[in-house]
Image (spheres, rainbow, N blue to C red):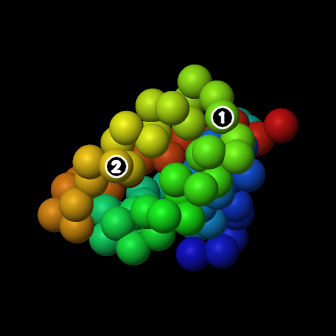
Amino acid sequence: MDYFIDDLVSGLSFNPQYQSYGKAIALIPATEVVEKREDILRFIASHPSDESAHLKALVEKMNEFDNPLVMVVTFK
């Protein structure tokens, strides 16, 4: 998944399942979040925000059996 990169909150690359009106929606499988947990947490630590603090709490608790993350991105 390397179509876009979330360079504000998570650092994750994603391939949108839907894109319209300046927004994109992607599903990030829990297995990918768990696999990239340390990278995501490092990115969050270097890019603090309210959104990243909320994501950090989710990422720290996720396991590979959880539902995917829904990523909604607003393009600037």
| Mark closer to the chain start, 2 or 1 | 1
Q: Position of residue 40 (x, y in %)?
A: 54, 57
Q: Which residue is drawn at 68% across and 70% down?
A: 3
Query: Which image quadrant for residue 30?
Result: bottom left
Q: Position of residue 25 (x, y in %)?
A: 53, 48
Q: Position of residue 60 (x, y in %)?
A: 34, 49
Q: Is residue 25 visible?
A: no
In the rendered view, does 22 fall on the left or right side of 36? right
Q: Rounded to the nearest whole Å, what is the CA distance between mark 2 and mark 1?
A: 15 Å
Q: Is residue 26 visible?
A: yes
Q: Mark 2 points at which residue?
A: 60
In the rendered view, does 65 fall on the left or right side of 76? left
For the residue carrying disc 1, how many other residues have a C-alpha within 10 Å: few (<14), some (14-19), or many (20+)?
few
In the rendered view, does 43 fall on the left or right side of 35? right
Q: Which residue is drawn at 59% across and 56% down?
A: 42
Q: Which residue lies furthest to the top in this view?
A: 50
Q: Which residue is drawn at 70% across and 46% down?
A: 46
Q: Mark 1 points at which residue?
A: 48
Q: Residue at x 83, y 37 (%)?
A: 76
Count the marks: how many? 2
For the residue marked with disc 2, what is the amino acid? Glu
- Above or below — where is 22 with respect to 3? above
Query: Which image quadrant for residue 13?
Result: bottom right
Question: Which quarter of the rendering shows the N terminus?
Answer: bottom right
For the residue marked with disc 1, what is the amino acid? Pro
Classify mark 1: helix, strand or loop.
loop
Q: Residue furthest left?
A: 65
Classify mark 2: helix, strand or loop.
helix
**Which residue is more in the foreground, 5 or 60?**
60
